[in-house]
Amino acid sequence: MKNPRFYGLPHAEFRPSQCDAIQKISALHESGGGIIFVDSPVGTGKSGIATALGHFDTVTVMTSTLELLAQYEKIYGFTAIRGRQWYPCVYNKKIDKWNGQYAPTAFDCHFSKMHECPAASECPYLEAKYAVIGARRSVMTYRYGALSSSIAKRPGFLVFDECDTAVREIVAHAETLIDNAEIHQLFNIPAHGVFKANSQDCTKSGKIPANVANFLFCFLFVNSVAVE
Ligand code: SF4
């Protein structure tokens, strides 16, 4: 292999296992793709491997922490995006509405289609979003990546950094809201039925059939369920 700088790394020599990993992953990619797990201790240059893959195709890295995201951004030159609350809103009407008492961010945006905002061309969040969609090497958190349909369409390599944390991070962000009316409609429960946090309590009350209560109880563990 050539010098690491040729592959976009900021140093002159590869660490021992980096070459091997890069060659194996790029070969798999050339042959049509697949899933590969890279198991290596801290300090062996995993971020460098992800960076080098950008020589072959587009790379999208997801991390569980903002610290790791910043490392990709600052050391390896990835284009990064963070949550909406990190970007100020620059729409004058919105800023005036808060009258200096609060500095709105893109998190407070009221446009369901943000590109329809009169200030869209100057919106820092949209700028960051378009940059990360078009970049050769992009990085974001699992939580951001899991919710973005634009990111899902990016071709090339998808790197789950510290992938043992991926499921926890993604599921932690999932939320399902069910109101009382929907529960009654879905399961044909009498109007006075009461749902409690414990399935035994529900079935003891006789107001919710055991199978329904058990289903709801299990559901709590895979989703965040809000019952009004
Ligand atoms: S799209 Fe407009 S209103 Fe929304 S965050 Fe950006 S500048 Fe503010």
Image (cartoon, rainbow, N blue to C red):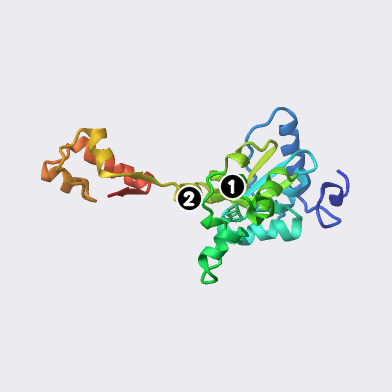
Q: Which amino acid does label 1 sit on?
A: Met
Number of numbered labels in the structure image = 2
Query: 10 Å neighbourhood of mark 1: few (<14), some, or many (≥20)?
Result: some
Q: Which amino acid does label 2 sit on?
A: Arg
Q: Position of residue 100 (x, y in %)?
A: 55, 71
Q: Residue at x 30, y 42 (%)?
A: 218
Task: Report if the beta carbon of the residue with label 1 is closer than 8 angstroms to ligand 1.
Answer: yes
Q: Quadrant of residue 192?
A: top left
Look at the picture and state if 147 lies above or below 109: above
Q: Mark 2 points at which residue?
A: 168
Q: Residue furthest bottom?
A: 101
Q: Position of residue 123 (x, y in %)?
A: 65, 54
Q: In which quarter of the image is residue 32?
A: top right
SS category of the residue bearing label 2: helix
Q: Quadrant of residue 109?
A: bottom right
Determine if residue 115 is in view. Answer: yes
Location of ligand 1 given as a quarter of the image: bottom right
Q: Where is residue 98 in the image (x, y as percent from the top left)?
A: 51, 66
Q: Residue at x 75, y 55 (%)?
A: 76
Closer to us: 36 or 158: 158
Instruction: Please give left or right for residue 25 compared with residue 172 in the image.
Output: right
Q: Which residue is drawn at 21% across and 50% down?
A: 196
